[in-house]
Image (cartoon, helix red, strand yellow):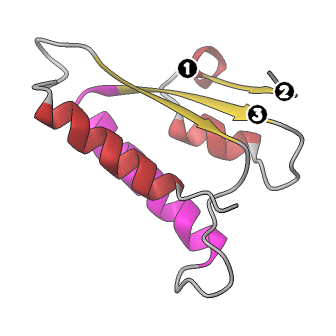
Amino acid sequence: GWTNTPEAIRQSGAELTRAGCDGVARVCLIELVTDGQPNLGPTYALSPAQLQAQSLQYAADEKGKGTFFNALGVGSSSGLSESFLASVASTPAGSHAARIGDY
């Protein structure tokens, strides 16, 4: 399967906005759970590295609105980067990012 992480972050942020979550009066949280690096297959215009950069930009945009992020990586995929999870997660990443073998 494919892992469209940037779109998941974008849609989650849009849902929080629709719900009136502004990061001030209401705490906003996106829980990102993924089993691999962002990718959409060989026919998609953006490479996994570009999708990862887009994911980080969307996460930064949401964090700028006051949204918190927890990032959880599941599995042993070599494409699952702990540094990517830490970059998406709120700080300190040690409290907001983790990787587990399975569930």
Q: Position of residue 95 (x, y in %)?
A: 60, 14
In the displayed structure, 97 sits above or below 4; it is above
For mark 2, does the 10 Å Cα neighbourhood hold few (<14), some (14 to 19), or many (20 or more) residues?
few
The residue depicted at 88 percent of the width and 53 percent of the height is 78
Which of these two is toward me, 92 or 75?
Answer: 75
C-alpha span from label 3 to label 2? 6 Å
Q: Earlier in the sequence, mark 3 or mark 2?
A: 3
Would you say 48 lies left or right of 13 here? right
The residue depicted at 17 percent of the width and 13 percent of the height is 26
Residue type at mark 3: give it: Val
Query: Quarter holding the N terminus?
Result: bottom right
Q: Earlier in the sequence, mark 1 or mark 3?
A: 3
Q: Main secondary structure of the magenta part?
A: helix
Residue position for label 1: 92
For mark 3, does the 10 Å Cα neighbourhood hold few (<14), some (14 to 19), or many (20 or more) residues?
some
Q: Are marks 1 and 3 in contact (CB under 8 Å)?
A: no
Q: Quadrant of residue 43 in the image? A: bottom right
Would you say 35 lies left or right of 68 here? right
Magenta stretch bounds: 47-67
Q: Are marks 3 and 2 in contact (CB under 8 Å)?
A: yes
Residue position for label 3: 74
Q: Is residue 57 magenta?
A: yes
Residue position for label 2: 102
Which of these two is toward me, 9 or 50?
Answer: 9
Q: Position of residue 79 (x, y in %)?
A: 80, 56
